[in-house]
Image: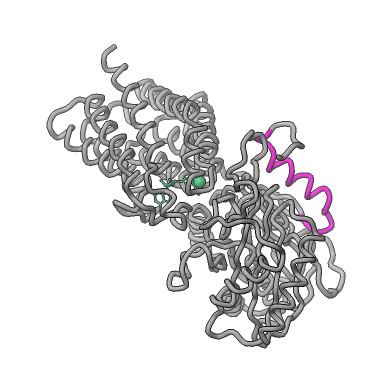
Amino acid sequence: MTKIFDDPGQFADEALDGFVAANSQYVARVDGGVVRATEFPAGQVALVIGGGSGHYPAFAGLVGAGLAAGSACGNMFASPSAGQVYRVARASQAGGGVLLSYGNYAGDVLHFGQAQEKLNAEGIETRTVLVTDDIASAPLEEIGKRRGIAGDLTVFKVAGAAAEAGLDLDEVERLAIKANHHTRSLGVAFAGCTLPGATEPLFTVPEGMMSVGLGIHGEPGISEQPLPSASELAQLLVDGLLKDKPETAGRRVVPILNGLGTVKYDELFLLFGKIEALLTAAGLEIVEPECGELVTSLDMSGLSLTLFWLDGELEKFWAAPADTPAFRKGSLAPRRARSIESLAETGTMPALAASPASMAIATTALEALKEARAVVVEHEEALGKLDAIAGDGDHGIGMRRGVDAAVAAAEKSHAAGAGLEELLAAAGEQWAERAGGTSGALWGAAVTAVGRTLGSKDAYTAADATAAVNALRDAIVTLGKAEAGDKTMVDALLPFADTFTKAIDDGGSLAGSLCAAAEAAARAADATADLTPKKGRARPLAEKSLGHPDPGAVSFGLIASRVADYAASIESR
Ligand code: ADP
Ligand code: MG
């Protein structure tokens, strides 16, 4: 249980402020995360890492000389937004290009990917290396689908040391990819973790049992077994990882035993002793190991073992010095403090003085967003529970944060006299910015796209309405790349769009067509219970999800139905 906070909604931000206050010789706060507080040479590659908060020392704790140049810090367990990543990278870079590196999660991939596009478009050369070390999350043949867990550290360390050594972006990228291919992890949990303000843990492990293969967001494990002895646990972890040894592995290996939250150091050391003996007995040479908390999961009781398989160059960069708040190795020459430019917020400014007719339409859009918010609030808890079955349990809270921010932004632009396009642009941007998670990026892009398609006019035709629905569909499909049957919100979205277009073509009214489309979406959302996920965080736990509908499809159906009811209530006035 997380006990220390004033307002759970502000937990991540306030914790980050305090972290910076406690480490001001290392890091400085910028909009979206933290950057190094010390100078580094112009032309050096900037390693920018990041992810959800709640994993300290990942990610902000790894910013400093010899390691990361900056970290984008999302909300609790939620990806930072594209805007956050972009602003942190801008503030971090020193003219040598940017390497983005982070654990492989759908939400992070979307947001970091959008930021990368924007940075490249502005002439800041930016590449990405995903960390995919978790052997429990996908089989070896599908290594690119694996999640990133404690192996983050080896990839970041090698990339950071290579940047520190003055290597160029091509080389830093190559070494980071190689480090990732040489890193394998396996985790276990004894009890779940609880988000600040929540009364229930994200998942539970039955008394006397252990869950094997969990993710660091509380995604449940792939199997459960009776709690083993320390020697049996060491054997399970070592056996699992040796079976998954990379083909190119040599004999020199770095073991990293990582505590996930509430396992005590003494317990970790006891276990480490047994692991060391097993690795040595297997003929391996142990090099500069780590044993402690490196990537955590709030108050989760659990641990993971990572094996980092060395070759000559990887060993050199692993052993190189680093000096960060949470990870120190060797010694570096002292660094001078640098001045941090404060980056202006990049909010969308509403264009003023829309016509009265256009403003009236914008008022309707604002009311529709409020209806969406109401239905999300009503179902917040249920959506979270649904997501916890096979995902990370944050769909309710993420949708709530997103739609709250969207309504607030829409209200602000409405008060400033904005028309429909500006109002929806502001709402979409803030939805993506504040929600975190995959669904936040998708909903944000969708709302913005609808605004762009409709523009700010005095009146709309049926053809405008179908164009807007098509824009909504295309924005989500283009960004998320999910297909029908992947068990995502797209499975509710496609029937929604098809039914709407057909109903309008048949001469239906706007409200009537929306109601028919929403019914089709809700039905299709229910039917996703029979599918197994192929995209997003639920994918590694495909079987667990069978029999339960996809949370994103369900929330899509709920929002569509509520907005359709609202349209019907206006039409009947
Ligand atoms: P996260 O998965 O990052 O925790 P949420 O829990 O808020 O984000 O949202 C999960 C939902 O997002 C899923 O139930 C699914 O409907 C949707 N989703 C995940 N990946 C995709 C994708 N690539 N395309 C469309 N929808 C997706
Ligand atoms: Mg989720």
Q: Residue furthest left?
A: 506
Q: Residue at x 61, y 48 (%)?
A: 74
The mark tally for this picture is 0
Relative image position of residue 221 (x, y in whole percent)? 54, 55
Specify the quadrant that holds the N terminus: top right
Residue in view at x 79 percent, y 45 percent? 18
Q: Is residue 511 above or below residue 127?
A: above
Vertical side of 564 occupied by 401: above or below: below
Q: Is residue 191 left or right of residue 348?
A: right
Question: What residue sits 63% from the left and 65% below the top?
Answer: 152
Q: Nearer the viewer, residue 263 or 449?
A: 263
Quarter of the rendering containing residue 269: bottom right
Residue 13 covered by magenta stretch: yes
- Quadrant containing the C terminus is top left
- The region drawn magenta spans 8-27
Q: Nearer the viewer, residue 173 or 557?
A: 557
State the image coordinates of residue 188 (x, y, percent, origin top left): 62, 59
As rendered, which of 54 and 112 lies closer to the eye?
A: 54
Q: Main secondary structure of the magenta part?
A: helix
